[in-house]
Amino acid sequence: MEQTKFHGKAQAYEAARPSYPAAAIRYIDGLIGDCFGGSSNAVPIADIGAGTGKFTVPLAGLGLPVYAVEPDTDMRGVLAGNVRDLSNVTVCDGSAEATSLPADCVDVITVAQALHWFSPAAFPVECRRIARDGRYLLVSLYNVTSFDSAMRPDDECGDRLAGSIKHFDDTKADFFRKPAVRSFPNPIRYTRDSWRVYMDSHSHSPLPGDADYADYHAWVDEIFDARAIDGILTDDTTCMVTSELVQCD
């Protein structure tokens, strides 16, 4: 469908981005059961902004039908490979505002580490279009770093780093009215090499052929050197799950 700011970064994303804790997946399974009761085996899910499938794959382990919607061609290619053997997953070329899904087709809409890219005006309209029976369970997940490692300092932020905690706070306010919020530990340990790959996976990161790539990696190494102990950088990441059963207006 298109190239996003993650184009060319799918391999780094797949290699170094953290997955989601098993406890969070069990919690979401419970939410689905609470909302849809005994019919849970027939509950279809749209995982929108699925990326390389970091959340799609464990979500598919619940045994429910999953539509994995991803706009970027590179990310979608890795996603397709990761779910090739999962018969309950359908990969879709679509975006948050135009999923390509038929109307009235899902009960649950999940978004992992991506809701801040969506339009607060247009995304709910698409959710209402694809939802069955005038309601849907919206679930958003963020792996929130213990320090704001996700963003490069720029003119707006100065020397301050900003990242996933801001995305979590902003999307909770923009997309939910009466959300339920749960947190789950998801600690990550980086070597210098895995830290470099992780930092290459962000939307703002230059690609290896870009003129500022060497300067960027020097900055990435400075962060590692300042925080690593005995060659390991510890990020006590927390997985934040926000949910709400939305009744369509």
Image (cartoon, rainbow, N blue to C red):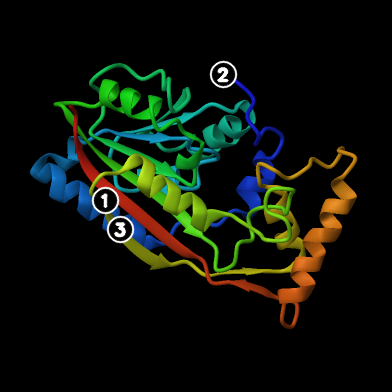
The residue indicated by pointer 1 is 179
Say if 165 sits above or below 66 in the image: below
The residue that appears at 43% across and 20% down in the rendered structure is 98
Tag 2: amino acid: Met
The residue indicated by pointer 2 is 1
Classify 10 Å Cα crowding around label 3: few (below 14), some (14-19), many (20 and above).
some
The residue that appears at 43% across and 60% down in the rendered structure is 239
Q: Earlier in the sequence, mark 3 or mark 2?
A: 2
Disc 2/disc 1 C-alpha distance (Å): 32 Å
Please report contact status of discs 3 and 1: CB closer than 8 Å, yes or no.
yes
Disc number placed over residue 181 in the picture, else none: 3
In the picture, the quarter occupied by the C terminus is: top left
Left or right position of 152 against 164:
right
Q: How far across and how far down the image is residue 201, in percent? A: 67, 47
Near-viewer residue (95 or 197): 95
Classify 10 Å Cα crowding around label 1: few (below 14), some (14-19), many (20 and above).
some
Near-viewer residue (65 or 102): 102
Q: How far across and how far down the image is residue 71, in percent? A: 54, 26
